[in-house]
Structures are given as structure tokens and as C-alpha cells.
Amino acid sequence: MNQPITELYKPLTVCRICDSTNLTAYLELGNLPLANRFLKNETDFCPRFPLTVLYCNNCSLSQLSVVVDPEFLFSHYLYKSSISATFREHCAKLGQELKTYFPEPKNTLTLDIASNDGCLLKEFKDQGFKVLGVDPAENLAKKANELGLPTICAFWDNQTAEQVMQKEQPEIITATNVFAHTHDVKGFVAAIKKSLAPKGITVIEFHYMGSLIMENAFDTIYHEHVSYFLLKPLMLLFEKYGLRIFKVKLVPIHGGALRLYAAHSQSEFQTDPSVTELLEWETQNKMYDLETYLQFKNNVKQIREDFVTVLKKLKAEGKLIAGFGAAAKGNTLLNYCGMTQNQIQFIVDETPEKQGLLYAGTNIPIYSFDAIDKYSPNYIVIFPWNFSAEIIKKIGEKTKFTQKNGKYIIPIPKVRIME
């Protein structure tokens, strides 16, 4: 089925930050399946939805042209943050950093929005903080609670903020890799403003549009990520709701993320030079210019052409090609490029819940690590390319792939082959 299921999504024709209707579609990836949906068999329900990105000519926000029903997207979620050692280390560093702001963590409640399986909560708890999570996925919230990481199973909104405040007003509110998933960003920020302690801070981290453009990371675009942020439009949003962004930091996780630190507008936190510096960088690199996004579209088309050409050539030579990491970004890449099991025989993933399932839209089977030595592929495409160093090291330690002169294909920011 290639036609979208219209009752499960709604079109978006107004900028979710500034309410402008002056939007330009600059990247159309087609009707694609949900990136984190996995199938039991080839006849399983696999809805597709338009995946088109719009540019707001008023505030420079990029957003999808449709919003898929969040209940359909997130009520059961197979992505687990704690799978990646790189991400666990990233969380540990964030916990250590925030301890410098609040040196008595035992008296400090840290709330993590979209806490997933509790990966970040665990690091905060290890630092001595009191912790509380909020996540809408029943399976993940249950898992976190079983691990002793208190978690409310809910979407973050005004009602959930009130529920949190009945327990205690958090002095730290974190939201990593969720803000871009949020359709109602105004309500999201308003709920943070309402619940944040007077001297508290909020730390929000998301894929940064500047890095996405520079890295050609179009595979980060999928239906869960409804917004693609620059700093400029977020300054407008936070100021509107009485919060002030006082510091920003670019971090390498997920192929390039922006971490912003905000507090109540009248707080004592001094505004760091990093805020002005990033705004200047955005201006200098024409992030507020539609032509930049039209060039990005051309770069995306070139990656598709190069990727298809390389795989076609290798298949003609009789090479066996596998993939590693049934990540959301791999789903975007493969479906946009029209790949199936004819090109990539299988994908290895460490998440047990994904093993034995099929990648939506491609019907490529997902296996455990054992499949690498069992089938001896000549090439492995690394879909979570932002974790490629960690993955290559792990494959080398756990399999004979390197000993058999296997090679890796890294698709982003440009297609290349590594030994």
C-alpha cells in the first residue's frame, strides 16, 4: 500500500512557532512508512504518510507538512536509549555537568521528559539526584519503574506538569531528543515554565538544523521529527513564555545536536556569549535564506544517486550486502532510495525486540549479531552513521567480519566505503 492513511494524520499549513502561513516546501521524500515501525510479516499493516519539509519564510523554522497521530506513533516504542554506549556516556557527562549548577543533588529533583527506558535518569540517580521521568510509551515506562526509576506514563503537557508539581517542583527539567517530536511546542514550553522551580534550569537537546544541513543528514527526517530547529526561532518561542535561553552548546550526539539551557526570564543566570555566537553563525551561513535549503535538496538527491549506484555495482559483482542498526534514520534512507531485500539481505540490530521483524517498507529481515558470521556479508551498511566508530569496533570484537576483509559503507554525509 503506497497511499497514505489520511485518518491518521493532518496537514499542517501554519508555522507552529510564529503562526505564519508563508511556508515553502523544499524537500519531498515521498510517501514513507513510519521509521520506528517494524512488521511481523510482509502482509502486516504498513501505513505510509507524506514526508515533506516546509520552510517558514518568516522565522526560518523547518517543519513537516503533516502531523501523524502521536498515539499511533508513540504508545509502543522499540527504540531504547540505553542500547548505545556512546549515548550512555553522553548522559553521564550531562549529569556531571548539571551537578556543577546544583552541588547538593540529594535535595534537587530532576525531571526528564520523554525519559525512554531511564538511561538519563539512571545517570542522574548515580550522581545523587532525586529523579522522575515522564514517557508516553507503556513498555518503556514500565521498564524504567522496574529499574527503580520513577516514571509517569504520559505525554508532557499542562496536565502532566500539574501531576509532577503535586510531588515536588523540579529544579532541573531535561528533554533530550523529544522537542523535535512535539507538535504543540507552545504547550510544551508553557508546561516547563509552569512547573520549573524559581531558581531552576531546563536543558533541552535536539537535532540541530544547522548541523543537519552541513552534514546532509536528511535521514534524520522522519515522521516523528515534526520540527527542525535553529536557535533564532527558539529565542522567539522561549521569550514568549517567560523563559530565557542563557547558554547553548553544540554536541556531536545523533550526528549534530544543539543543547540549550534556559531559565526564568528574571533569573540570575548570566547570558553566555555562546548564544550570540551561534546566532551570528546562523546568519553567516545563510540559515535564514531559502536558497540554502534548495541547495540541501540537491545534495540529498546526489546522495541517493550515489548510494543506489554503489549498491547496484556491488550486487552486479556478486557481493553480499548487509546492514547494521535498524535505526529510524536507516528506514528513511532505504525507503527514499527504494531499497529492498534485493539490495540488502538483512540488518543486524542489538535490540532483542526488533530481531525477527521486518524493516517497514523494505521487508528486510532483522537479525541478531550471529547473522554476520553465519552469512558472511562482504559489505555492511552502517545506518546509525553517527555511531560508526563504536559500531565498527563492536563488530570487530564480536565477529570475524574484519578478518574476512569485510568493508563498511557509510552513507552520510556522503557515500563512502571504509575497511
Image (cartoon, helix red, strand yellow):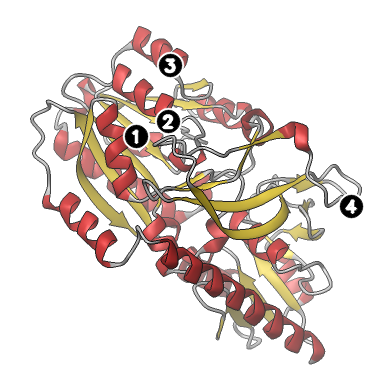
Does dot 1 land on a helix, a strand or a loop?
Answer: strand
Q: Is 170 left, or right, of 37 in this rendering?
A: left
- Closest to the observer: 328 or 118? 328
Between disc 3 and disc 2, the foreground one is 3
The residue indicated by pointer 1 is: 174
The three-letter code of the residue at mark 1 reads Thr
Residue 217: image location, x then y, percent: 50, 64
Between disc 4 and disc 3, the foreground one is 3
The three-letter code of the residue at mark 3 reads Asn
Res. 101 visible in picture? yes
Real-space CA distance between mark 1 and mark 3, rounded to the nearest whole angstrom? 16 Å
Q: Residues within 10 Å of mark 4 (few under 14, many from 20)?
A: some
Give yes or no for contact between labels 1 and 2 (Cβ–Cβ under 8 Å): yes
- Closest to the observer: 388 or 220? 220
Does dot 2 land on a helix, a strand or a loop?
Answer: strand
Res. 95 visible in picture? no
Numbered badge on residue 9: none
Q: Which tag, 3 or 2, sits closer to the chain's start?
A: 2
Q: Which tag, 1 or 2, sits closer to the chain's start?
A: 2
The residue indicated by pointer 4 is: 42
Real-space CA distance between mark 1 and mark 4, rounded to the nearest whole angstrom? 39 Å
The residue indicated by pointer 3 is: 158
